[in-house]
Structures are given as structure tokens and as C-alpha cells.
Image (cartoon, rainbow, N blue to C red):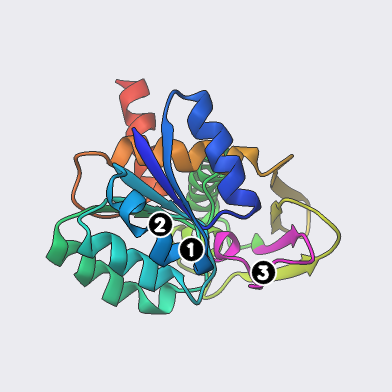
Amino acid sequence: MKIALIGYGKMGQMVEKAALERGHSIAARISASSWNADADAAQKADIWIEFSNPHSAVENIIKAAQMKKPIVVGTTGWYDQLGIVQSTVEQQQIGAVYSPNYSIGINLYVEIASQVSSLLEGFPEYDVAGIEYHHNKKQDAPSGTALAIAAAVEKNMKRIDKVSFSSVRCGSIPGTHTLLFDSPCDTISITHEARSREGFAAGAVLAAEWVQGKTGLYTFGECIQEYIYRRST
């Protein structure tokens, strides 16, 4: 599989390493300043993997759709334009995956959080809150991952209107998310701690492999759910 890397910062470089380790090749490495020079190389790729910035993400997705290229989007902070992206992807009949977090572990964590929330729905003595930690360069707070975790809890604990999620930005923490289910008698806590961003890169490459031949807009969670289903049957 020939991959165009849209955004070649730290994450783009990690995606390159993960892709090469899985036997893929890199057709293009594109930064904001090199689009005109590298557009032809991007056209020759089988798929694009995008880790740029919130201001460029939607434009990059539209470019991929216009060139009929499937795309995996790792950038967050653009979800207020999700409707535009969905209609563009469907119109151009490409496959696209988006996620606030491509860690396989964190997506399994969301599944676990959903199940725990469902179990505790019938125990009103348990309240819930979350806290997330990231490096001090992360722009969005709460993170897209925290919002996804909160949404999973709210879907399964219908008595909870909104999960309170606190955000800490400090140092070089790759990402830690904790949910606390607290009652007067005890506390249940579940935590996912990323050790490095390499797991995010591996997940993005997995998503690129999975979306080949598909059309429509998917979350990485849907990709993970399909893998879980395959392994359980």
C-alpha cells in the first residue's frame, strides 16, 4: 500500500515508521508549504493519512475526496464541520476514517467504559467523573478522546446528563484518561495510560488497511469493533 502522509510532524514521522514496519511504502510527505510541489505524488498514493492541524484538516479531506483517495484523519478540532465532511465523503464515494485517538488500547477502553457504565446504570448511588492528562502543547481541552469517553458513558448511564471531565496539560505526557465511578462506600476507577505516541501511529496504519475498498465515513471505533467481532466468532 502506497501512503501519502499529509502533515509530516512528529505524528507523521511515527506513522511513516509504523507503515514501513508493516511493509507499506510512502508515496508523499506533505507539509502545508509543499502542497503545490507534492500534489502529483499524493495523487499516486493508494491512501492518505492526515495528521496536520484543525485549520487544515477539512480542506485536506475535501482534497482527498476530489482526488478519489481514501483517507485516515488523525487531526481533531474540526468536528463542528462533520456534516460537511460526511456529505463530501458520500458524494465522492471514498472511504474515510476519523478518530480523536488511534490507540487500539484507548478504543478498547471506550468499549470497557461502555460496559461498566451499563452495569452501573441500575445503581444510582454511583456518580461518575473523568480526568485526562496530556502534554502542554495539546491545543484542545477537553480532548476529543475525553469527549468520546464521556459520550460512551452518557449513552449507557442515561441518568447522567453530562460527565464532568477535567483536563490537565503538563510536560510531555502522551495521554492518560481515568474514569471514576464513586459511591459513598467505594470508588471504581478505570485508567488508560499511553506510554508513547507509537500506539497512535500503529492504529492509524491499521485503520488505513481496514478502510481499503470501503466507502463512507467511519470512526476508528467501528474498525476496532469489527476486529473484536471477528475474533469472537
Q: Horizontally, is 8 left or right of 1 in the view? A: right
Task: Identify which residue, 42 or 138, lies in the foreground.
Answer: 42
Does the magenta portion include 29? no
Q: Amino acid at mark 3?
A: Phe
The picture quadrant where one finds residue 64 is bottom left
Counting other residues with Cα less than 10 Å from the Cα at mark 1, is it few (<14), some (14-19), or many (20 or more)? few
Residue 151: percent from left, percent from top = 48, 64
Q: Residue at x 32, y 36 (%)?
A: 210
Q: How far apart are the two marked residues, 1 and 3, measured between alpha carbons?
A: 38 Å
Q: Provide the residue span drawn in magenta.
A: 128-147
Classify mark 2: helix, strand or loop.
helix
Judged by depth in the image, the label closer to the viewer, 2 or 3, is: 2
Residue 161 in percent (x, y) is at 51, 75
Pick the residue in front: 54 or 129: 54
Asked if the residue at tag 1 contacts the one at tag 2, i.e. Cβ–Cβ closer than 8 Å, the answer is yes
Residue that numbered label 2 is attached to = 38
Is residue 130 a member of the stretch shown in magenta?
yes
Q: Which residue is mark 3?
A: 165
Residue 125 higher or lower than 78, as above or below: above
Residue bearing mark 1:
34
Which of the two labelled residues, at mark 1 and mark 3, occupies the earlier sequence position?
A: 1
Quadrant where the N terminus is found in the figure: top left
Q: Quadrant of the C terminus?
A: top left
Give the CA separation, mark 2 to mark 3: 41 Å
